[in-house]
Amino acid sequence: MPVIRIALVEDDISHVQKIKEYLDRFRTERGLAFSVRVFNDGEDITENYAPDYDIIFLDIQMRFMDGMSAARLIRKNDPSVTLIFLTSMSGYAIQGYEVDALDYIVKPVSYELFARKLERAIDRLRSDSWYSVLISSREGTVKMPVSRILYIEASSHQMTYHTKNGSFAARGRLDDLEKELAPYGFFRINRGTLVSLTHVSAVRDGCCVIENEMLPISQKKKSAFMEELTKLL
Amino acid sequence: MTPEMMIAAPGTVYAANFALAALALGLSNPPRGTLLRRLLIGFGLTALNILFAHVTDFDINALYFPTLVFALGIAGLILHLICDMPAENTVYFTLHAFIAGEFSSAFSWQICLFLLRRGLLAASPFRLNLLCLLLSALVLAGLGFYCSRLSEEHAHFRADRKTLVSTGLTVLGIFLFSNISDVFTNTPFSGNSAFEINLIRMLADAGGLILLEAARSHRAEVQRAAQLQIMDNLLQSQYSSFKTSERSMALIHQKYHDLKHQIAYLREDAHSPDGLAGLDRLEREIRSFEAISSTGNHVLDTILTDKTLQCQQLEISLTFTGDGRLLDFLPPMDLAALLGNLLDNAIEHVSGLSGPAQRWIELSVRKNAGFIVLEVTNPAGGDIQFENGLPKSTKGDDRYHGFGTMSVRETGERYGGSAGFTLKNGCFTAKVSFAAPSA
């Protein structure tokens, strides 16, 4: 795992101190490498923003530019960075979904809770490049990260991988792939289709929607499919 | 073949039928393992049963009862191995398998006897055995097909002790009636010829089977209705507790505003610095009553405020993040029951844990892809067992608990989503999804 690049945007010095302590402790406990940059206001990070971070902790309440406005500006330049909001106001509405925030931390935060949230964020970073399958097609063998696979279709002994990098035809059995990929959030929606649940954008008319493709879910699998999907939402 | 031997189907056919009937009835219950595994176990043990019956020459002789007990034991073992259900249910369905096996054997044998009488079949014992076995396997395949359609009905089916006693007595009665001619040839209910004797047996078993099925389907119906009733009561009680706290909060709010105006009025008359300081302090103190939560959703605010107060007393920190307005599409009744269920379960669980690091609950509402997600996370003390993807109730008697989580899932499903429960890194997470209403 390469160095994890973290930005902390927070105007309260005591909180900055505390979170830096937590990060240090987490780094020693897990044997990870972090680089941490601290900004004292939303304005400081958004001015000449460069997408150099893996995780950004953003305080919601700041003097010049609040966390939500900063997040909107950051999202414009950086669609993939993980955003985690810090707030001292529990029980108030935050429109985190607008900027696709991963999580919220309510201050004051205990180390255990902070570590859990950070762990989840790092897990997600890793899963992007974490596990790959080898696809042997006629054109040669491709190593494909599972996170780029959208769904796999099978007809007699011929399988088609639909991925973010295009489609590949290969030999193999869907039964074997189903077992191999189940831990990575793949689900068999009917006899011939294995889908990646993380790429499902909606479910309607008995079909799940992946990149505007409508893939039919068999009636018998519907309930289990919705349950597994919910766990990953 | 002597005429005495003709009065009933061969013992090996009976042994095979008990086992196959168990396999067929097993299809109506929550499965254990893949279909292939279940079929292998079913057919493997059927073969064992046939072999044993062949060795002991399963017929009216000294070894009759031991062989019968062994054959039924195997039927019970099949049900135990292929179904995920309590022991009482295994016994219950073994009793059913007994009568179903008796019927299919007698039914097939009657056809064999008919063909024999018409001279359409040579009286070779081997051929007769084989034909009888094949015919009865067909009957039981039909039973298996019927049973596989009942699995929904049996997901929460429970046979209690009273049921077992009454079913056991019924089965004993059917068994005695159907076999009376084997032992006593001279009663008003005994037959004379093999054809007659077996016909009586078959009719008694058919009647018995219909009786058992009627009782089973009635029982399943009654249990289902009782479960719905419990879920409905739960919903009602959560909703009425929401209504109560809504009323008391409205009252507190009104008192707060009255008090605020009175303080402002008093301030005009107060001149001493002590008096003013006192009013300042009073104002600060009552401010906490203004509105504890403002998530954007009225039902969520009320329940959250209520539960926050409850949590404060128990020294549990309850935090909410997200946007409550995302839940506006849910009718208050459903939302109140859902939140009440989830938070009550979390509070109950967490209050049993020690240490402030363990006493927290996080509630959040998010939008993800085409779904609204309501999530409750809390530390899990010890191991949590799951059944059908739902956490098993820790409250002992599982016939009446666990309905909270069942109703949570049902609510999600009603709005195009579902519910998922996971245990990871020592934390228990309950997520409920809904299809996001199209704006």
Image (cartoon, rainbow, N blue to C red):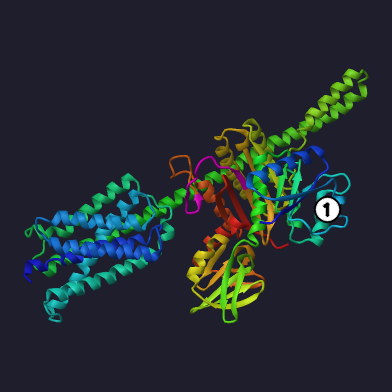
Host chain of mark 1: A
**Is B71 situated left or right of B329 in this image?**
left
Give the residues drawn in magenta, as a range: B376-390
**Is B21 situated left or right of B178 in this image?**
right
Quadrant containing the C terminus of chain B in the rendered view: bottom right
Q: Identify the residue shown where x is 88% and y is 19%.
A: B275
According to the image, label 1 marks what residue?
A: A70
- Between residues B347 and B180, which one lies in front from this camera angle? B347
Task: Tell me: residue A218, above or below residue B270.
Answer: below
Instruction: State the image coordinates of residue B81 (x, y, percent, origin top left).
Output: 34, 56
**Is B318 situated left or right of B136 in this image?**
right
> The disc labelled 1 sits on which kind of residue?
Ala
Residue B380 belongs to magenta span: yes
Q: Identify the residue shown where x is 69% and y is 50%.
A: A33
Instruction: State the image coordinates of residue A191 (x, y, percent, origin top left).
Output: 49, 72
Q: In this rendering, does residue B330 appear at all? A: no
- Between residues B226 and B15, which one lies in front from this camera angle? B15
Q: Identify the residue shown where x is 69% and y is 56%.
A: A2
